[in-house]
Every structure is written in C-alpha cells, then in structure tokens.
Image (cartoon, rainbow, N blue to C red):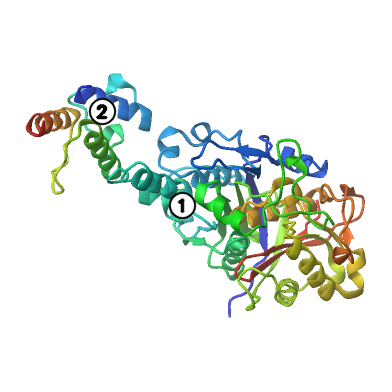
Amino acid sequence: MDSLTLIREFLENRLGVSPELVVAEAPLNDLGIDSLMMLELMFEFEDRFGITLAKGLKSPKTVGEMVALMDRLRSEQS
Amino acid sequence: MNQQRRVAVTGLGLISPFGGDLNDFFARLLAGESAVSFLRTDDVPRPLAMPFVRCQHFDADAALGRPLAGMMDRFTQLGTAAAFAAWEDAGFSRGQPTKELENWGVSWGTALGGVLAYEKGYRDLWQNGRGRVPPLSVILGMNNATNAHISIQLGLGGVSMTHTVACASSSIAIGEAFRRVRSGEAPVMLTGGSESPQAYAVVRAWEALRILASGDETTSPQACRPFSADRTGLVLGEGGAALVLEEWDHALARGARIYAEIVGYGSTSDHSHLVRPEADGQRRAMQAALSDAGLSLGEIDYVNAHGTATPEGDSVEVAALIEVFGELAARLPVSATKSMHGHQLGAAGAVEAIITVLALHQQAIPPTAHLQEIEPACLGVDHVTSARRGQPLRAALSNSFAFGGSNAVLAFRAVAH
C-alpha cells in the first residue's frame, strides 16, 4: 500500500472524509487532522509500514508533505 | 445567604435496551417486559455466557456521527447519545458556545469508565504481544470522557465532573447537579450516567462474588427476580441515561415542559462493610432525602427500590424502608425495575431517576417483574407486581445503595398538568 492510500483510508474510516478531497495540496487540519488525530495517523503509519517516527518530528501541514515524509522514512528504514 | 431555587426536570434521554424511544421504554416497563437476554461472547480462554442487558439496537455512528463515535469508548457513546436526546427533549439546540452557557455544567456518573478501551489495550499488550497501544487510549479510557464530550458538544462552560461511586454513581451525580441548580450556581445542569461493563475481566470479577443471577438462553428474561423467594442474584447491563435539571423560573420563562420537580437528595455511608449493606445507613439516606425535600412520610406514594435481586440486599432494603416508614410501610408502593432493565451499575441511578420521574409524570407505577412468591424477609411493603394507575402519585423516592456502603436517595414531586 502506498502512503497516499493509507492516508485516504484513515481519513475515510475514522473521519468520514471522501477520498477525492485527499489531495497533495489539502491542509491536513482542514481534513480533520488535529493534534490528537495526527498522533493516531502517525501510529497507523508506524504500525502498517513498520517504521518509527522520531519523537520531536515536525508535523507535516499538507497531505503532500505527509506523503513525502512517510515515503522518505520508509526508504530510510527498510 | 443564597436563596434556594426550585429545580425542574425539563429533559430526559435514555438509550433503551428495548431499542425504542423513552415512551416505548416506560410503556414496556409498565407492561412488565424484560430486556434481559443471554449474552454469549467468543472471548478466550472462556467465553462470557450469562444473562445480561445489552443495548444491541444502539448505532453509535448513526447517533453521533463516525468521527465523534470513533473518539469514544462505548460507555461514552451511550452517555453522549443519551445526553443529546435529553438536551433536545428539553427544547435546547446544539450550537457554538455562547455566553449564556458559561455556567451550565455537566455532572456525570460512571462506575467503570472506559473499561472496554482499557481491556482492548491490555489484550494488545499482554495477549497479542504488541509493544504499544493507540494514542487515543487515554482519551477513550478516562472516566471523565463522557462529561468532557458532552460539555464540548453542547458548549457548556460550567463544571464538568464525574462521580464514581459504584452503583450509586449517577444518583450522586444527579444529587450534586441538583444542589448546584438549587443554590443558584448553575441555571441548568446536564446530568446522568453511563456504563458498558461487558469487559472480560470485569465480568469474571463479578462472577467471583457469586452474586450474578443464573440463567440460560431460555430462562434469562426472568433471571433478575428482586424480592422473590427464589432470586439468585443480579443481572449486569449496559446503558446511558441523562436528565436536564433547570432552575424553575428559568424553565417557566422559556415555556419548557416540566416533567417533575426534584426536591431532595440524601447521601450517607454505611461505614460498616465493603459489600454487605446496612439498613441503618439506607434508613439515614432516605430520611436525609425526605428532610432535604421537606416531605412527610405520608406524601411518598412510590419508592423505586435499588432492588438488585441479591439474596442479601433486597431484605436489607425492605428492613430500611420499614424503619423509615413505620406503620405506613405496609401501604407504601415499592417496585424494583432492575427486574426488567438489569443493573447498569454507574448508569442505574440515572435510569431509575428517569423511571421515577416518568411515574410521577404519567401517574403510573411500573411493577417488579417476575414476582410471584415474595421472600418472607421482604414482606412489609406494598410490592407492586403489575402496573398501577388510578391512585394519585404526589411524590416518590429513588434509592441507590452501592458497594462500599455509599447510599444515595433522590426525592421527586409531581407537578400539576
């Protein structure tokens, strides 16, 4: 599964957000990802891809930034 | 000195184990219908298999929306949905916080809190060998999750508090809410309780006390038999129930429907034994509620008993009632509605407060179901065994007597229509 699909599934299952709205330039906050849901999303990524997100990691602002971060971590930690 | 205000009950909301609305719930109780069924799970190593009261028709996503429901343990889903129903029933709408709601509060009762969330976490860690649990675990598990969500969703800026006192949790929550409205601290308080106790270890713990009723797929509906000579114990259940308590003039000014007046609250401790109830502590709680309400013994036309159907508890409660009411006890109508809706622990007090309010509002007493042969030690009061109408109901008491010896009694008075 790619990072964008994971984000789309998470937002649809947990927050009822339509996948068409989850595009690269969409701000995560506008899609319902507040600080608490960001923790849950990060947990989901760690779980699904077997990666570890560093504690002091700066939270991405957009979907595209999140995808880029996840893809980088997956290639670094694989 | 603050002038004491009168306090009206202007909204009721409840998640019915029968699946219908509040009126349907009360109508079925009047008809003596039981919501008890047989619960069998697929837990390992030993499935739960027992009489239980489930709110199996409750659809959290439909009641709350998926995003909100996903942030809640089931006890919070049940409680928040009940609170929304009570809020709407009172004629309030849900919007952004306004200045007016800044001192409107929430007082909620739960014995176990988010125990299902905790248990899922423990299973993940200890049974499934995972190294961690999801970030929302704290938010789901914390005992104050329900009142937190209620105050956020309804925009209430006053006190947001939880009361955890075993079986008396929501009676105490209601009593403390009543005090705040009566004193003038809060014009409106949203109060009630919720519980979802069907966690594996919780049920195993209750089983170990040997006070759960026996029953199978066929006999479960009649398993909870308060005051009966052949009673075998209590039936656990889940539930959520909420009431809106409102300062009297505030309610009149906006033309609110007033179900009943809440007039008294008595809370005592047995200071005796951790599980064995004491008639003296219960007597003092009932007398305190009557005194607080300014009601005389002769004005009480109904008592909704704690009546869990444990062999020990029922007779102690009847003894306490006789101590309080003396010569009047023999003609005092008493019923134990747990015979039909089970014991929802922290939600029980709120469910029974609603039943007591509806009894006064509709002038009808629901029965103790399945009561054919009364145990001799439970004789001495007027046991209601089928719905009773036709005699005026002026005032009523609702009893909750908890493990640990905490007793809470609420007093209500009927209003003229």
Instruction: Give the CA separation, mark 2 to mark 1.
Output: 30 Å
Type of amino acid under label 1 = Ser
- As drawn, the residue found furthest toward the left would be A76
Q: Nearer the viewer, residue B223 or B46?
A: B46
Query: Quick one: SS at disc 1?
Result: helix
The answer to whether residue B97 of the structure is visible from this angle is no
Q: Residue beneath label 1, please? A: B151
In the rendering, at what x and y percent does residue B240 appear?
A: 59, 47
Q: Which residue: 52% across, 31% down?
A: B62
Report the chain holding disc 1.
B
Q: Which residue: 73% across, 59% down?
A: B310
Q: Tell me where residue B109 sits by quadrant.
A: bottom right
| Residue B391 placement, left or right of B42 | right
Q: Nearer the viewer, residue B112 or B99?
A: B112
Q: Nearer the viewer, residue B125 or B370?
A: B125
The answer to whether residue B225 of the structure is visible from this angle is yes
Tell me, yes or no, whether dots 2 and 1 are on the same chain. Answer: no
In front of the other: label 2 or label 1?
2
- As drawn, the residue found furthest toward the top would be A20
Type of amino acid under label 2 = Ile
Q: Nearer the viewer, residue A58 or B404?
A: B404
Q: Which residue: 29% across, 44% down?
A: A36
Query: Quick one: SS at disc 2?
Result: helix
Q: Residue beneath label 2, please? A: A7
Tell me whether circle 2 and circle 1 mark residues in contact (CB < 8 Å).
no
| Residue A54 placement, left or right of B327 | left
Does residue B214 lie above or below B346 as drawn? above
In the rendering, at what x and y percent does residue B203 appear?
A: 56, 50
- As drawn, the residue found furthest toward the front would be B45
In the rendering, at what x and y percent does residue B235 appear?
A: 68, 50
